[in-house]
Image: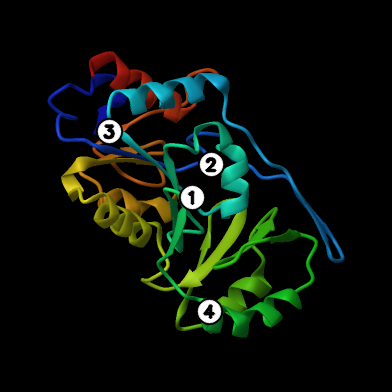
Amino acid sequence: MRHIKDIKKEDIKDIKLIVFDVDGVLVRRGTKIKQEGNTTTLETKKIAPEQISQIHRLKEKGYYININSGRGLYMLQEMFREILDFTSLTYENGSATWFDGKIYQHVNSFHQLKKVIPKLQKVKHSNIKGFEPKELIITIHCTNPVKEIDDIMSKEKDLYSIWNGEAYDIGIKNIQTKAVGLKSLIKLLKIKKNNVLVIGDNYNDSEMMAEGGIAVTADKDRVKGHFYVELEGQKLPADQLMESILKIK
């Protein structure tokens, strides 16, 4: 793997679409959530003004921009409101994409998930901080893995359960992935796999990163890529990636 600072004009000559994961890439990892009875309080993070400026400059240079995240649509729209006029949002681990003011749903998971939700809601443990409101996947925020959740999910043959360090993401195996969302967006944009650069940092990004022509990892211990980037002071991985591309394009 090469450091992102070593990326050359020749490396990105075919790139038309840049795909960003969110947590650990555009914002720092960690979600503040509190659930009391039927009331859930969830922190909405904002991207920095400098990132907004960088993304605008990428758009001016002709790149399509996509945010591909496990977060829900409403939260992503709040986070990226300043760039929504030219940015597509693929949400809930590839379940659907908001593009040009329309929603394209890639996966229908209702019947599979409705069977397991009551079982998970019955689990009471001090490590569980709350269920993040979502439409098409289940996300349970915890301070640490919970054995009762692992036991329930081990019996579910059609569903996956990924522990990402702060939460469980639960969806349909081999179908409900960020890669599915990316492949659908590639078709919508009428481009090819080698026209895509993807940056991610977590286990649920690996399939998505494999669907791009260039993969950039923001965490070498969790996922591999053609290039890597590391935290550099206050600069997040996305900041450094955009800086490197803007310098040579």
- Nearer to the camera, 46 or 32: 46
Q: Residue at x 28, y 23 (%)?
A: 61
Whether label 2 touches label 4, CB < 8 Å? no
Q: Earlier in the sequence, mark 3 or mark 1?
A: 1
Q: Earlier in the sequence, mark 2 or mark 4?
A: 2
The span from disc 3 to disc 2 (Cα, nearest Å) is: 18 Å
Q: Earlier in the sequence, mark 3 or mark 4?
A: 4
Whether residue 92 is visible, yes or no, is yes
The span from disc 3 to disc 4 (Cα, nearest Å) is: 34 Å
At numbered mark 1, what does the secondary structure look like: helix, strand or loop? loop
Q: Is residue 228 above or below residue 186?
A: above
> Dot 4: few (<14), some (14–19), or many (≥20) neighbours within 10 Å?
few
Q: Residue at x 76, y 78 (%)?
A: 122
Which of the 4 image quadrants contains residue 140?
bottom right
Q: Earlier in the sequence, mark 2 or mark 1?
A: 2
Which residue is denoted by mark 2 in the rendering?
23
Q: Amino acid at mark 3?
A: Phe
The span from disc 3 to disc 1 (Cα, nearest Å) is: 20 Å
Which residue is denoted by mark 1 in the rendering?
69
Mark number, residue 154: 4
The colour scheme of the drawn protein is: rainbow
Q: Amino acid at mark 4?
A: Ser
Q: Residue at x 30, y 25 (%)?
A: 4
